[in-house]
Image (cartoon, rainbow, N blue to C red):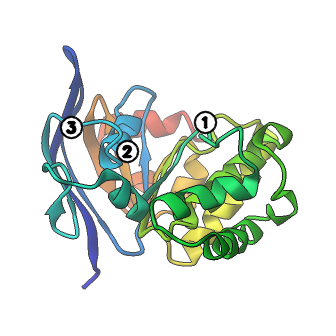
Amino acid sequence: MAERILQINHLSKSFGKNTVLRDIDFHVNKGDVISIIGASGSGKSTLLRCINLLETADSGEILYHGKNVLERGTNAAAYRAHVGMVFQSFNLFNNMTVLENCMAGQIRVLKRSKDDARSHAMAYLERVGMAPYVNARPRQISGGQKQRVAIARAMAMDPEVLLFDEPTSALDPEMVGEVLNVMRDLASSGMTMLVVTHEMAFARDISSHVVYMSNGVICEEGPPSQVFGNPTKQETKDFLARFRE
């Protein structure tokens, strides 16, 4: 039986009177690649931010290996080292080089030595094709390159799960492919991934499971062949019709 890493139970979140997430339930097993799709404003990014503890859910549970991380006493930084996140806006430190960006978290959170952090960072920068740019600062590289550095930085923390919040939405169209190729490589290597995306071909071809959200609830979920090939809800059919030829 697959090892369960995350279990989301009855998760709800409101901003004032606006309920963004309603009674969300799903789980993430080791090796899963789960794509979360849906229209803008459906709660996808808020769900990811709650899972990463960047937003505080109003009710429900987020179990990491059976322990509820919403309870008091959770070390958020240590948890995020295991459940890493890649943002649409990269969130790189502009005053650091590419290499320093990939070393900082390892040194501060994982307490690695500089030498260990450097060798670990270099391994992942090479993997995403960014080793030639280790001395560049974020302003000197393209958006696609920034996102590849952000992925390398997250991977250098040796996470169990990587959360991707619309990682290609801030990129020029010609740069989307280079980031998706890195993500495909991670998925094929067995990395556990939870991806909020508008890239329907990626969700259809790479995912092991697809979650369609609408108005803060999970409207439909299942294997890509079912959600894309034979959706049961009219709402899912209408949403996907926009992306079909």
Give the position of the N terminus as an image quadrant: bottom left
Which kind of residue does numbered mark 2 sit on? Leu
| Residue lying at 35% horizontally and 35% vertically, measured from the top left | 46
Q: Residue furthest front?
A: 113
Give the position of the C terminus as an image quadrant: top right
Is residue 10 toward the left or the right of residue 54 in the image?
left
SS for tag 3? loop
Q: In 3D space, how far apart are the residues under numbered discs 1 and 2 (Cα atoms)?
A: 15 Å
Mark closest to the chain's N terminus, 3 or 1 = 3
Which residue is tagged 2?
48
Number of the label disc, if any, that sits on residue 129:
none
> Are the residues tagged 3 and 1 within 8 Å (C-beta)?
no
Which residue is tagged 3?
57
- Looking at the picture, tell me which residue is in the foreground, 118 or 129: 118
Which kind of residue does numbered mark 1 sit on? Ser
- Looking at the picture, tell me which residue is in the foreground, 222 or 104: 104
Res 225 seen here: no
Asked where in the image residue 109 lies, by quadrant, the reply is bottom left
Q: Where is residue 57 in the image (x, y as percent from the top left)?
A: 21, 37
- Looking at the picture, tell me which residue is in the foreground, 208 or 98: 98
Which kind of residue does numbered mark 3 sit on? Ala
Res 168 seen here: yes
| Residue lying at 53% horizontally and 71% vertically, measured from the top left | 112
